Amino acid sequence: MKELSMAFEGRVAIVTGAGGGLGRQHALFLGRRGARVVVNDLDQAAADAVAHEIAAAGGQALAIAASVTDEAAIGALVQSVVERHGRIDILVNNAGILRDKSFGKMTLDAFRLVVEVHLMGAVICTHAVWDTMRAQNYGRIVLTTSSSGLFGNFGQANYGAAKMALVGLMQTLAIEGERYGIRVNCLAPSAATGMTEGVLPPESLERLDPALVSPALLALAGDAAPTRMILCAGAGHFAAASIDLSAGRFIGGGADAAERVVAELGAIADRTQAIVPERGFVQAEREVASAERAATAGEGA
């Protein structure tokens, strides 16, 4: 077998929700590739067990229990890691929960809780490491999104909303972090974990070993990582998703503008010449350019 690269040797990585499931596999993967891994979980015993696994395999790991929604606890975690290692290179925001129900039967408390853990948990952890990464001019942040956010899933309005919000977070953090060598990407995993029991059919779960997702971290968190990528991974299959913008059509104003939008909706939505904008203002810039071209064409008629 070809010797595995030690691409993360000397790097310090924090993995949240790493006491089991996908987070555990992420932590083990990073440890095998040379990273000094901080195993974070709500359960200290679970975090300790994973840290011991990494150490038994010849790696370095530290287990710290803390809720990702607790700003003070995460702040203390980050401070202790910096004091111990002098830096933080990688943050894998993996911690999450499910509270599935159809939207009409879902309580607002259940909605808020899922958003709090997935979205605000990632925000709190990322904010805690941001200044350290900026100061060292290096950082790799992985946010865990989901096909439920990208494409929707019945009974997961809370989860899907939180997961799509993480894509929006990635888009802006990647722009703001670029000058500091911070690259921010999203991972959309399909894995058989405690969170997916009862959600996916048994025959699918057999193929969705969480260990088959973690190799994506080499691409998303390595030295040569891209930024603003959404990488989908499951069952050993990898694909990239994106939010694109169609070429669209100039409709203009007037009393019948709404009717013309309806009439041209197929052409407006045609993705033949779609692009993935580098930043949000590209939309407005294209719209103004389209209006100016239409005005120029009208003047020349």
Image (cartoon, grey):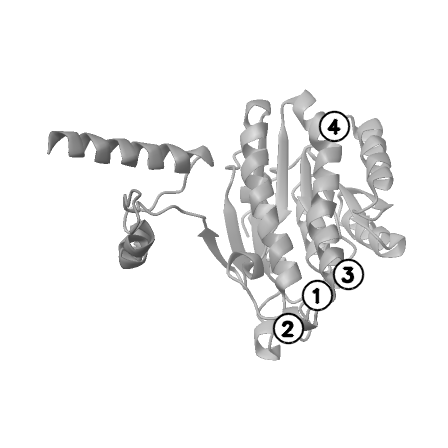
Which residue sits at x=52%, y=37%?
A: 227
Q: Alpha-carbon distance for marks 2 and 4?
A: 39 Å
**Residue located beneath label 1 in the image:** 195
Could you tell me residue 42's position as x and y percent? 84, 53
Q: Which label is found at residue 109?
A: 3
Q: What is the three-letter code of the residue carrying label 4? A: Arg
- Where is mark 2, residue-wise? 199
Dot 2 and dot 1 residues touching (CB under 8 Å):
yes
Say what secondary structure mark 1 lies in. loop
Q: Nearer the viewer, residue 62 or 261?
A: 261
Secondary structure of the residue carrying tag 2 is loop
Q: Determine which residue is flagged by label 4.
A: 87
Tell me the mark number nearer the camera, choosing from 3 and 1. Answer: 3
Which image quadrant for residue 126?
Answer: top right
Q: Position of residue 263 (x, y in %)?
A: 27, 58
52 lies left or right of 179: right
Specify whether 289 is left or right of 211. left
User: Farthest left residue?
Assistant: 301
Q: Residue furthest right?
A: 45
Q: CA distance from mark 2 to mark 1?
A: 8 Å
- Which SS class for mark 4? loop
Q: Residue furthest front?
A: 255
In which image quadrant can residue 158 be found? bottom right
Q: Residue, x 52% and y 56% (percent of image)?
A: 150
Callout 2 amino acid: Val
Tag 1: residue type? Met
Q: Nearer the viewer, residue 211 or 102?
A: 102
- Residue 101, image x and y in percent? 68, 71
Labels 3 and 1: the sequence-earlier one: 3
